[in-house]
Image (spheres, rainbow, N blue to C red):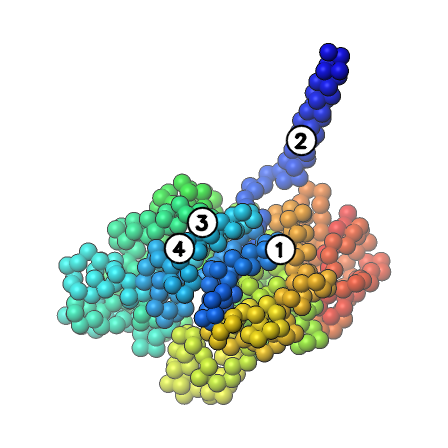
Amino acid sequence: MIKRNVLAHLILTVLLLLFFGCKEQQKEEVSTSSGIDRQWWKEGTLYQIYPQSFKDSNGDGFGDFRGIIEELDYIESLGISAIWMNPFFKSPLVDNGYDVADYRAIHPRYGTMEDFEEMLKGFQDRGIKFVLDVVVNHSSDEHEWFQKAKTSRDHKYYKYFHWWPAEKGDPPHRHSLFDTEGGWDYVASNNSYYLHTFAEAQPDLNWENPELRSEVYDIMKFWAEKGVNGFRLDAFQFASKDTTYPEFPEGHEKDFIKWYGMRPELHDYLNEMYTEVIEPYNVFAVAEGAGSGFEDAHDLVDANRKELQVAYHFDYVGMSSTPERYELSQFKEVFSRWDKAFSENGWLAIFLSNHDNSRLVNRFGNPSPEFRTVSTQMLNTFLLSMRGTPYTYFGDELGMTNIDMPTIEEYVDISAIGEYKSALAQGKDMVEFMERLNYGSRENARTPMQWNDTENAGFTEGKPWKRVNSNYKQINVALQNNDPNSVLNHFRKMTQLRKEHLVLVYGTYQLLQKEHPEIYAFTRMLDQEKVLVLLNFSSEASSITLPEAASIQETLINNYNSTNVKGDSISLLPYQAVLFKFN
């Protein structure tokens, strides 16, 4: 009996210690994150996979779900929290899947629905969320809705699209981003013109029709019930249209978003989507684009609006879309301005590359063999130390670079081909045009993932759908995996650091010495934790004088082996990136 009482006492003591220990830990967590609305989509790092370029499992030259399943452990090793995957629905692939013929069916080249479900479970088992790319500003012209809409104006699907009856004469001009002939195309079978903001094969859906909206919400529910955690709404700022189709002034397309985007009715539809899908299924949503400025962006994502959760703006894109070197002062200004505008309400996505832009290191860093590693590490450090949800694009964790494609014959992207035809028609200098296209084309981001130094970089045993970059023997996963100083392992350290330090997620941001021509310096502060971020955007050594330097306590991460700190002066080597804790 005595032994049993002693044992019971010991168990009770341990339980009490655990209870009060947990209470103390809980109290500490609350004090560390007081007043913060903690959400996984704020704290996580999103990793974007372009599925046809990631990994091919069956030798047909196209990436597929089973290829991704083979690399689930690699994806988990990156420390990312969520996957955003480009469309894999049934499609004629005029625009690489952004022309959807069936929103509930998988394109056979990616696999089956069972393959998708196995892949999704693989992510879920590893604690990784899944964000679906939903293309509902437009569909494919091969979608059943459009095929039946063409048969008769009396068919219910006719009202799922935007039409101009031919007996009214020529429709008012609308600009098309992918079609030099404009945004209307004629269908003889119903004697009407249909509207398309993008390619001729991508008719715009009529969001002003409540039946269409209900169909879209049902599609989103279908995927949410399969376990999808969020939605990225492609080109959604253009979804609402004025169905009186007024005349627009000549040259209006130079301010495209003003004339084609962010109509007031769009907010009603997003609020309806929130009520129908986002809130009941506890998912999050982000739209491609955030309108013309801060007011538009806040109207989309402020919590009281009950619409979207994350603003995804493009203000930085233009500064790096041509071979001319951007100014660091401009880079600082854009990111600082947006951070200030969202310091109290709303939430931002932070990104430097995706499937629609050329590679991160070519645009913002230095792709030369001497500086490619350190400059990519520096850019990834920036991305993962800013306030907002980081969106990183596959291959940027390795420092993959642009591919050289100097002639138009190698391009398959409908956007690049459309731009080429337009430049030719306008009599532009085509040598200069091709130089710019070679640098800025989104085809640069779509080359196959570089896994190892075997044929086709280990991406496929067949002929790859797009040529593998010739530098794959110098840049690949196998080479970097066990190198502690590689781009890959630096990326892993940064994602882990972001998880361990909430200051890098929620902390206030303050720009330091905004006029410094080479160094981007800023602080992040949350409660008692303070971090100093120093990034040298130059191929030359540079130094900065800061009062904060005297209070440095600890180096959190450094892409070089040392840092030169003397008093209040800090010297940085080319493309050096350092995070310090300070008092």
The answer to whether any part of residue 349 appears in the image is no
Q: CA distance from mark 4 to mark 1?
A: 26 Å
Q: Earlier in the sequence, mark 4 or mark 1?
A: 1
- Residue visible at 74% across and 60% down in the picture: 558
What residue type is disc 4 on? Met
Q: CA distance from mark 4 to mark 2?
A: 43 Å
Q: CA distance from mark 2 to mark 1?
A: 29 Å
Dot 2: what SS?
helix
Front of the two marks 3 and 1: 1
**Residue behind mark 2:** 22
Q: CA distance from mark 3 to mark 1?
A: 21 Å
**Residue behind mark 4:** 113
Dot 3: what SS?
loop
The answer to whether any part of residue 188 appears in the image is yes
- Residue visible at 75% across and 15% down in the picture: 3
Q: CB atoms at circles 3 and 2 under 8 Å apart? A: no
Residue 212 on image: x %, y %:
28, 53
Task: Kindly indicate the quadrant of the structure image that contains residue 80.
Answer: bottom right
What residue type is disc 1 on? Ser
Residue 187 on image: x %, y %:
21, 71
Q: Nearer the viewer, residue 271 or 510?
A: 271
**Residue behind mark 1:** 77
Front of the two marks 4 and 3: 4
What residue type is disc 3 on? Val
Q: CB atoms at circles 4 and 1 under 8 Å apart? A: no
Front of the two marks 4 and 2: 4
